[in-house]
Amino acid sequence: MPAEARENPLSARMQLLTGAEAAAHAMRQINPDVVSVYPITPQTPIIQTFAKFVADGEVDTEIINVESEHSAMSAAVGAAQAGARTMTATASQGLALMIEIVYIAASMRLPIVMAVGNRALSGPINIHCDHADSMLARDSGMVQILTENAQEAYDFMVIAPRLAEHPEVMLPVLVGQDGFTITHSAEPVSLLPDEQVRRFVGDYRIPYPLLSGEVVTQGPFAMPDYYFEIKAQQVRAMQAAAQVFDDLSEAYEAYSGRRYQAVEGYRLDDADRALILMGSSAGTAKDVVDQLRAKGEKVGLAQVRLFRPFPAAASSSTVSASSPSPAFSL
Amino acid sequence: MRELKSSHQLPIGGAVLAQSAEPPHTGGWRVGEKPRVQLDTCVNCLLCWIYCPDSAIKIKDEAFLGFDYDYCKGCGICQEVCPTGAIKMVAEALVLPPLGRIEGESDAG
C-alpha cells in the first residue's frame, strides 16, 4: 500500500455519502474560486451540499447563481478566462442548454470542471438516468469520464481539475455520475484528507488569464484557415488527455490506493461473451458476471470510464485479446 | 500575403497576444471618401478625437495632429461633429499631405 494511504487508515476515512455529496466534498476540498450553477434534478444535491459548505465558510468559493444553464456555463467561461479555477454542475435538459457554450469553453481551452448527474433527455419527461445528456457533448471537445459509484464520483472530481488544467490538455472535463443510482444513493465513501487533495490538485494556472495584466485578445474570429489550425490544437489536446488520464490515475493511486483505467477488463480472460458498459450498470454487471462465472459460464465485462477521448485502442485490446469472437471487436 | 502559421506555432485557444498581433489596417475598408483638415480653421476642440469610432484621430499631448488613414474607415463622423467646418470629406483619390493636414488659408478640398 502506498505510504500516503497507510498514513490514513481506511476506516478513518469512510463516510456514508451519496454520490452527489461525495462530489460536493471533492469540490469543498479543492476549494475552487468560482462555481456558477443552476439547479436541476438530479444534480441539485451536488450544488445544494456545496452551497452549504460555502455558507458555512468552509471554502472561499464564489457561487454565482444564474438564471439558466446557458448563463451558468457562460459565467463559467468568463470566470475561467479571468483566471479563476471554475466548476459547474448540471444534468439532462440543463446540459442541453449549456452545449452551445461548452463548445466555446473547449475551443477557448478553458479547464472548467463540470459535475453531471446523468439524466435522460425529455420527453417524455424523465428524471432518471441514461447518458443521452452527456452524449450531447460527445463532439464538443470536452473530456468525459463516467463513474461507477459514489467513490468514483468523488475520486474523479478530485482528479478532474488536474486533468483539465494539464498544460497538454487545457480542456473542460465532465465527470458524470448516474442520476439517482449514484447521485442519491448513499454508500461508504473514502475521502482523502483535505490537505492531500489540495496537494494533489495544486495551484490553478492558465496561459493567458484576462487578469494577468498582459494584453491579449480572447475568442477572436477566425477564417477557415486559422479555424482549422486551432481545431487541430484541440484534437491534439484531446489525444493527449488519454495519456494524462493514465498518468494521473497512477499519481492518484499513490494517495488513494485505488487505480482506475480508461477501460477496465473484468474477468475477460477466456470469456466467450462480454458486456461493454459505462456508469453504474457496470457495477451491477460485475456481480452478474461473478454469479454466472460461479455457474461456469465464460462471461466478462469491459467497463469504459473515459468516454472522451474514447480509448479505442485500449478497448479493442481489452476485449479482442481475451476473446476471438468478432462480436466483441470495437 | 502573410504566411499562415501552423497550429504548432499559435497560442492555444485562438488567443492573440499583443506582441504577435498584426495590425489589421482596417483603413482598407474605406470606400470613396476620406477626411482632411484645414488647419487654420481648426480650434483644437478634439470633438473629432472624442467621436471617432476607430481611434483614427492622431493627437500629441492635447494637440490635434491629423488622421490615421491606416484605421480611418471614412465614416465622416468627424466632419459632422467639427464645429468650424475644418474637417471635410474629400475624394479618396485626392493626394493629401501626411495626416490630411492642409496648411494655409486656401481650401484644397
Image (cartoon, rainbow, N blue to C red):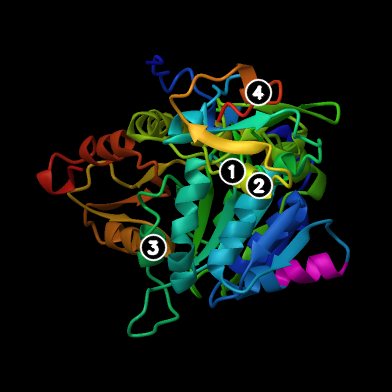
Alpha-carbon span between mark 1 and mark 3: 36 Å
- The residue that disc 2 covers is A80
Q: Residue at x 40, y 55 (%)?
A: A137
Q: Quadrant of the N terminus of chain A?
A: top right
Pointer 2 and pointer 4 on the same chain: no
| Subunit that carries the residue with mark 1 | A
Front-lying residue, A84 or A177: A84
Disc 3: CA contacts within 10 A as few (<14), some (14-19) or many (>=20) = few
Residue A96 higher or lower than A222, as above or below: below
Magenta highlight range: A49-56
Query: In the picture, residue B71 is in which quadrant?
Result: top right
**Please, what is the three-letter code of the amino acid marked with disc 2?**
Ala
Alpha-carbon span between mark 2 and mark 3: 41 Å
Q: Are marks 4 and 1 in contact (CB under 8 Å)?
A: no
**Please, what is the three-letter code of the amino acid marked with disc 3?**
Asp
| Subunit that carries the residue with mark 4 | B
Which tag, 2 or 3, sits closer to the chain's start?
2
Query: In the picture, residue B98 is in which quadrant?
Result: top right
Give the prevailing secondary structure in the magenta stretch.
helix
In the image: residue A313, left or right of residue B103: left
Dot 2 falls on a residue whose secondary structure is helix
Dot 4 falls on a residue whose secondary structure is strand
- The residue that disc 1 covers is A111
| Subunit that carries the residue with mark 2 | A
- The residue that disc 3 covers is A287
Q: Residue at x 50, y 31 (%)?
A: B26
Alpha-carbon span between mark 2 and mark 4: 51 Å
* Residue B45 drawn at (x, y percent): 81, 41
Pointer 2 and pointer 3 on the same chain: yes
Q: Quadrant of the C terminus of chain A?
A: top left
* Residue A34 part of the magenta segment: no
Mark whose residue sits in front, 1 or 3:
1
